[in-house]
Image: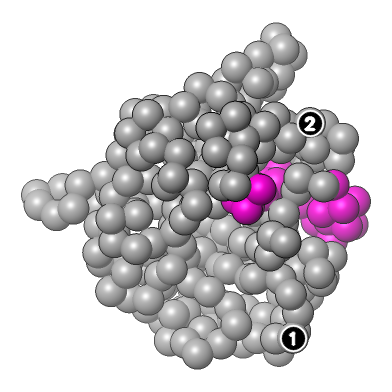
Amino acid sequence: MRQPLVAGNWKMYGSRAENAALARSLLDLVRPESGTEVLVCPPFVYLWDVGRLLKDTDVALGAQSVCAEPLGAFTGEVSAAMLKDVGCRYVLVGHSERRQLYGEGDALVARKFVAAQSQGLVPVLCVGETLEEREGERTAQVVARQLDAVLAVSGTGALAKAVIAYEPVWAIGTGRTASPEQAQDVHAMIRGKVAALDATIAASVRILYGGSVKASNARELFAMPDIDGGLVGGASLKADEFARICAAAD
């Protein structure tokens, strides 16, 4: 039985005061007896503050990106060891905004995946297609290529200590959401691809859906057999909304 996971990506929002209020509200609203794992990913500069509030609670801390290099003269970057040092358990790699806005290609994403695991962090590998690619019926091809890039350097076994997030680029921050059936089709394709390599890992790896997840659509999405939770953007900045999404995954 795969434990559901709901991850909140706070993106480049918040302040020390706003984040503290949000974290405290989440701790009040998220039920510790729930079977769903909850994760929040604040901006780098707030990881320590938020991490202190979440310490010894049922809400995990994650980062939004990581450097592919372990250390060195890489101005502006943050290493996996640094993230581990401030209490992170997870890190997003290959988020569509990193791919689209900052030119992170498949090879770099794969290196970041390996860097994260080298320090015991759990990478949340984001994959997904643009609207043009979906309309060109290339969704399966694009997602397979993104996944293959990681498997080529990490091996299938690495997925036993990772999470995959399918996030159609055309549904992120647009208000458009893949239908539960559309999302399930891609999730099933991903799980089937992994199963062809290792059936045991395929049965246990968690695959999240990301793309305008809200309390109003979460239950239908999470009811799909291969959707194990959500990677939530804007709705994760509202404690009550995020808590309802978490409840929908129970």
What residue would you read off at disc 2? 185
The x and y percentages for residue 125 are 50, 44
Apparent side of residue 33 relative to residue 237 in the rendered image (left or right): right
Asked whether residue 92 appears in the rendered view, the answer is: no
Question: Foreground: 178 or 224?
Answer: 224
Give the residue at x 65% y 71%: 37
Question: Foreground: 10 or 80?
Answer: 80
Magenta-colored stretch includes residue 188: no
Give the residue at x 53% y 74%: 60
The x and y percentages for residue 199 are 61, 40
Compared with 4, 17 (above or below) is: below
Apparent side of residue 223 relative to residue 19 in the rendered image (left or right): right
Q: CA distance from mark 2 to mark 1?
A: 31 Å
- Magenta stretch in the rendered image: 203-224
Compared with 238, 52 (above or below) is: below
What residue would you read off at disc 1? 33
Give the residue at x 62% y 35%: 195
Q: Are marks 2 and 1 in contact (CB under 8 Å)?
A: no
Q: Describe the element under mark 2 as helix, strand or loop.
A: helix
Quadrant holding the C terminus: bottom right
Residue located farthest toward the left when viewing the structure as drawn: 73
Asked whether residue 216 appears in the rendered view, the answer is: yes
Compared with 39, 107 (above or below) is: above
